[in-house]
């Protein structure tokens, strides 16, 4: 057995492994260097746990680099920073994606996190007392693994009938681009969740042609601000409430601010906003202009698409519309099935069955963080879950 000293100054024991397998890291491997992975790695290192951080991309914040130019956080700056690093003075209350990219890089540099870039993890295997990882950089082994690859890793577009025949453009909301690109275009947004309303908020400020919103379910929708108060500032209070009470508070706020949106064609939400976070992982949408456009008739709410043709989209009620561009705000997939499929720890959509401090006692040492939406927002949740996982691992090591 050998002892190494980490960059954080902690001593790490690397134990001998089986023939042909790598030495076992007596610590943790964190997979994914987004906000959740960075926060977990920092919490683990701070707790004295030797940590390696694997990132498949060649730089930090790659998904943020790829997202559209208009993207801002829906969570407030003061509740969206990682430990020990703040947004610079003058950063808007809801930071632009460029500020988020800078923040993630500042955090990694400040805490000197040991990130190995360009390392893709293909499969994780449980070996009874440790985990074996098959990666693009060879085999790796560790006592603990924290998966932080993100719940929005792979944009998802349904396989609508006739989609290949459509003469217009179909894009995922992740590839929204610039709002000005839609000037004069007829646009259909499919999906009334967080991504759908984000696109509509930006489009409401552009002189487009007709816009439609296809909504299968009504949204859990809150304004970005009430007067001068950023609504997200009260998220810690909302997160502390029982689910039924948080549901009631959000529903009352939505009705008070927007009125009865069913009058404009939006179906009622199937359940409360807090409940949906836990049941189907649907994030709470934020309005910043879309509702006014709906009420003004600039955005018409329509049923779900039934099928596509060359010239348009047939809706579930038989109506035909002819958009130039269809924006599929239809969610994401985790893409974890290949990596974890044989372990039986993900559901039909690839979402882990446990998250944060919870884990499967039959698979000790495997943790997930940042895989579900939260009332608090992803950054606050990353801090909380990273600390909780580190505490659990330290407790197991004693």
Image: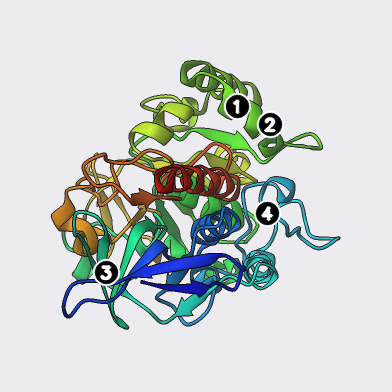
Q: Earlier in the sequence, mark 1 or mark 4?
A: 4
Toward which corner of the image does residue 7 lie, by quadrant? Answer: bottom right
Residue position for label 1: 238
Question: Counting other residues with Cα less than 10 Å from the Cα at mark 4, is it few (<14), some (14-19), or many (20 or more)?
Answer: some
Question: Which disc number belongs to residue 133?
Answer: 3
Q: Are marks 1 and 3 in contact (CB under 8 Å)?
A: no
Q: Of residues 135 and 128, which is closer to you in this image?
A: 128
- The CA span between labels 3 and 2 is 41 Å
Comparing labels 4 and 3, the label whose residue is closer to the camera: 3
Question: Residue visible at 43% across and 65% down?
Answer: 32
Comparing labels 2 and 4, the label whose residue is closer to the camera: 4
Q: Is residue 234 above or below residue 91?
A: above
Residue position for label 4: 83
Residue position for label 2: 234
Q: Earlier in the sequence, mark 3 or mark 2?
A: 3
SS of the residue at dot 2? helix
SS of the residue at dot 3? strand
Residue 321 image offset from top left, x and y in percent: 33, 54
């Amino acid at each position: 057995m050998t002892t190494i000293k980490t960059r954080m100054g902690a001593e790490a024991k690397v134990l001998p492994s089986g023939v042909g397998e790598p030495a076992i890291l007596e610590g943790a491997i964190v997979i994914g260097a987004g906000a959740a992975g960075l926060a977990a790695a920092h919490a683990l290192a701070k707790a004295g746990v030797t940590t390696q951080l694997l990132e498949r991309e060649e730089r930090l914040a790659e998904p943020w680099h790829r997202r559209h130019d208009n993207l801002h956080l829906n969570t407030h700056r003061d509740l969206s920073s990682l430990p020990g690093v703040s947004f610079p003075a003058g950063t808007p209350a809801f930071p632009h994606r460029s500020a988020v990219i800078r923040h993630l890089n500042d955090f990694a540099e400040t805490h000197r996190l040991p990130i190995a870039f360009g390392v893709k993890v293909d499969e994780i295997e449980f070996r009874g007392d440790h985990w074996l990882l098959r990666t693009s950089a060879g085999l790796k082994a560790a006592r603990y693994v924290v998966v932080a690859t993100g719940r929005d890793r792979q944009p998802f577009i349904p396989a609508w009938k006739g989609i290949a025949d459509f003469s217009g453009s179909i894009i995922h909301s992740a590839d929204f681009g610039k709002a000005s690109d839609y000037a004069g275009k007829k646009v259909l947004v499919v999906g009334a969740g967080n991504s759908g309303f984000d696109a509509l908020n930006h489009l409401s400020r552009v002189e487009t042609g007709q816009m439609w919103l296809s909504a299968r379910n009504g949204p859990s929708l809150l304004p970005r601000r009430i007067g001068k108060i950023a609504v997200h500032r009260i998220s810690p209070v909302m997160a502390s409430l029982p689910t039924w009470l948080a549901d009631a508070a959000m529903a009352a706020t939505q009705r008070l601010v927007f009125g009865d949106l069913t009058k404009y064609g939006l179906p009622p939400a199937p359940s409360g906003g807090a409940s949906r976070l836990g049941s189907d992982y649907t994030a709470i949408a934020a309005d910043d202009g879309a509702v006014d456009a709906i009420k003004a008739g600039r955005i018409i709410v329509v049923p779900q698409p039934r099928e596509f043709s060359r010239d348009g989209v047939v809706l579930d009620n038989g109506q035909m519309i002819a958009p130039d561009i269809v924006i599929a705000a239809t969610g994401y997939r985790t893409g974890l099935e290949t990596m974890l499929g044989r372990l039986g720890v993900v559901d039909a959509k690839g979402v882990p069955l446990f998250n944060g401090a919870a884990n499967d006692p039959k698979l000790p040492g495997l943790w997930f963080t940042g895989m579900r939406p939260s009332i608090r927002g992803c950054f606050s949740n990353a801090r909380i879950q990273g600390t909780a996982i580190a505490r659990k691992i330290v407790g197991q090591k004693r």
